[in-house]
Image (cartoon, coloured by chain):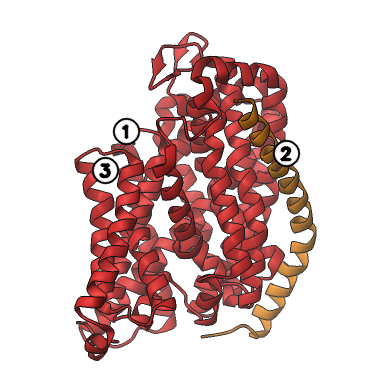
Chain colours: A red, B orange
């Protein structure tokens, strides 16, 4: 066991505080809008805290550190793109300001307002499938992190996964977005302290010169120049730019933060300043991965980089970073860092649970009831359906996390599963907001071709992620254009608001 | 190679400094935002759409 009693005490106090505060937030939930978008009461600073906490989890640290371990400094490229694109979206207000003006609660809701109820339903299903598959690997990887750092026997991995899930479910189900926002604030403070501490410790222990030399020795110039690295190149660059534009505008958990802000102007400020945090969100954990490469990268080569060897055991690249933390952090510091990582885990998972269950309840169950001419659900019943959806998503996460292991870098798996709905959704949102001729038929084609373009090549033909991702966005755009010209908006206008 | 290294180091320094700075400001000023959110939710002033 790597944990001292002081470490357990720090982690225990954090967990108690977080869950208690989250459950107490229940008294502020009066309506569906309170439950799903915190009554649209987020100010700039609270908005930044909750958006950053939502998109920084242990899973983020793990996949970014793995990326740094595998690809050296060249891995910084997607981190730079994600931050810069976010700043551009915030400064211009493209999509997000219009979304906030429309007072949406979920992204698929936009599809009913601009296209048709049927397209909202299809989008809801694709968003839920892509989002839940995306989140499906979180629990196992987070469980691995905690077991390796704390020294808990790996045979208790399922128990650790279950404990993480139950803790975050407790307050998410009860208090909805209000509970998530309040706990996000505490969790953001703690995870930021942990991020800064680990960055200092990692560089201090590995030594900056050793890190640069190790990358140069093992990866050569491809470890610095992303255009020379066979995994990246121009196709990766363009795919990442498209992907991050779509993530920052159409990703359900990010968009929910924008819907929850006080005004469109506040949403732009939140997005801009969080963009700067996103630079550190990517690059700092990548540095931890490079430090782990310098310390443990002595094993046999796997896809061009050496496997980590720790105490005579050969590990997977993704496990190098937690193994490093277990060795370099002392008592007390380790407790603070693990509490920070737990905070990161809980903030991401609770927001994602709420985000995907909101889509299931608002964009699948409710439209289906309307199509079947069932009476509208009361506010209380809608919240109940949302809580049931939360439980359903949680059960699936346990199953998928234990059953499925991504074939390559986890970062790329997450990108592809996100692309399942992002490619089509991004084309439809841009078309719906900025192109008068975008039609419902075009919307259907964009969603179907975008999803097929992501699922079929990756899961069945095992094509590279770059080509798959790029193809999905291209197919989605082509689908929107083709469908809109084949069946223009005027002809589809009769079906607007109904099931086509 | 060294040009790319300088480029990434400059980015890393910018990322680290802004991360620390924004975190500090957000933690201090965010408490006021939290209080305001609770006040408005309690009084029912939020957009109940």
Q: Residue furthest top?
A: A312
The residue pinned by badge 3 equals A458
Chain letter of the residue beneath label 2 in the structure image:
B
The label number, if any, that marks residue A407 in the structure image = 1
Q: Secondary structure at mark 1?
A: loop
Of the two numbered discs 3 and 1 in the rendering, the one whose residue sits closer to the viewer: 3
Horizontal side of A144 relative to A286 (left or right) equals: left
Estimate how packed mark 2 is, as few (under 14), some (14 to 19) or many (20 or more) residues with alpha carbons within 10 Å: some
Residue A119 visible in the picture:
yes
- For the point 20% across and 83% down, the residue is A372
| Residue that appears at 27% across and 64% down | A478
Q: Residue at x 49, y 61 (%)?
A: A253
Q: CA distance from mark 2 to mark 3?
A: 36 Å
Disc 3 sits on a residue from what chain? Answer: A
* Front residue of A167 and A281: A281
Residue at image position (55%, 23%) is A323
Q: Report the mark closest to the observer, 1 or 2.
A: 2
Sequence-wise first label, 3 or 1: 1
Q: Are marks 1 and 2 on the same chain?
A: no
Residue A213 or A124: which is nearer the viewer? A213
**Which label belongs to residue B13?**
2
* Alpha-carbon span between mark 3 and mark 1: 10 Å
């Amino acid at each position: 066991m790597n944990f001292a009693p002081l470490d357990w005490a720090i982690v225990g106090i954090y967990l108690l505080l977080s869950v208690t505060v989250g459950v107490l937030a229940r008294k502020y939930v009066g309506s569906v809008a309170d439950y799903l978008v915190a009554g649209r009461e987020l100010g700039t600073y609270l908005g930044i805290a909750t958006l950053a906490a939502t998109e920084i989890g242990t899973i983020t640290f793990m996949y970014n550190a793995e990326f740094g371990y595998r690809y050296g400094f060249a891995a910084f490229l997607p981190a730079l793109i994600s931050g810069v694109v976010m700043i551009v979206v915030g400064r211009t207000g493209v999509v997000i300001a219009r979304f906030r003006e429309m007072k949406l609660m979920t992204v698929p809701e936009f599809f009913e307002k601009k296209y048709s109820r049927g397209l909202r339903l299809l989008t809801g299903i694709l968003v839920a499938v892509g989002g839940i598959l995306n989140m499906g690997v979180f629990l196992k990887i987070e469980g691995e992190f905690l077991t390796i750092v704390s020294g808990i026997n790996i045979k208790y991995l399922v128990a650790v996964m279950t404990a993480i899930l139950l803790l975050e479910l407790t307050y998410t189900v009860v208090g909805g977005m209000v509970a998530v926002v309040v706990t996000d604030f505490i969790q953001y403070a703690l995870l930021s302290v942990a991020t800064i501490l680990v960055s200092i410790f990692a560089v201090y222990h590995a030594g900056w010169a050793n890190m640069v030399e190790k990358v140069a020795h093992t990866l050569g110039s491809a470890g610095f120049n992303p255009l020379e690295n066979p995994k990246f190149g121009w196709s990766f660059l363009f795919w990442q730019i498209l992907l991050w534009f779509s993530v920052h505008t159409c990703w359900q958990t990010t968009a929910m933060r924008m819907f929850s802000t006080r005004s469109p102007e506040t949403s732009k400020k939140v997005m801009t300043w969080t963009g700067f945090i996103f630079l550190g969100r990517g690059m700092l954990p990548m540095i931890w991965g490079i430090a782990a490469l310098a310390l443990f990268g002595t094993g046999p080569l796997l896809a061009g980089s050496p496997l980590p060897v720790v105490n005579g055991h050969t590990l997977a690249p993704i496990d190098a970073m937690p193994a490093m933390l277990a060795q370099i952090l002392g008592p007390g510091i380790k407790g603070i860092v693990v509490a920070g990582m737990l905070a990161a885990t809980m903030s991401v998972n609770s927001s994602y649970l709420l985000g995907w269950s909101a889509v299931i309840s608002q964009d699948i169950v409710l439209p289906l009831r309307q199509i079947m001419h069932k009476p509208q659900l009361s506010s209380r019943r809608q919240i109940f359906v949302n809580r049931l959806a939360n439980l359903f998503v949680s059960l699936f996460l346990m199953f998928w996390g234990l059953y499925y292991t991504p074939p390559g870098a986890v970062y790329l798996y997450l990108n592809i599963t996100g692309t399942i709905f992002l490619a089509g959704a991004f084309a439809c949102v841009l078309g719906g907001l900025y192109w008068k001729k975008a039609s419902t038929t075009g919307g259907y084609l964009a969603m179907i071709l975008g999803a097929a373009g992501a699922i079929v090549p990756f899961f069945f033909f095992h094509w590279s992620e770059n080509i798959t991702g790029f193809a999905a966005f291209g197919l989605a755009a082509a689908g929107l254009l083709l469908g809109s010209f084949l069946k223009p908006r005027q002809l589809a206008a009769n079906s607007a608001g109904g099931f086509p | 190679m060294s040009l790319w290294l300088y480029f990434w180091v400059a980015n890393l320094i910018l990322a680290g400094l802004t991360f620390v700075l924004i975190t500090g400001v957000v933690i201090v000023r965010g408490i006021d935002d939290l209080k305001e959110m609770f006040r408005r939710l309690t009084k029912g002033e939020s957009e109940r759409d």
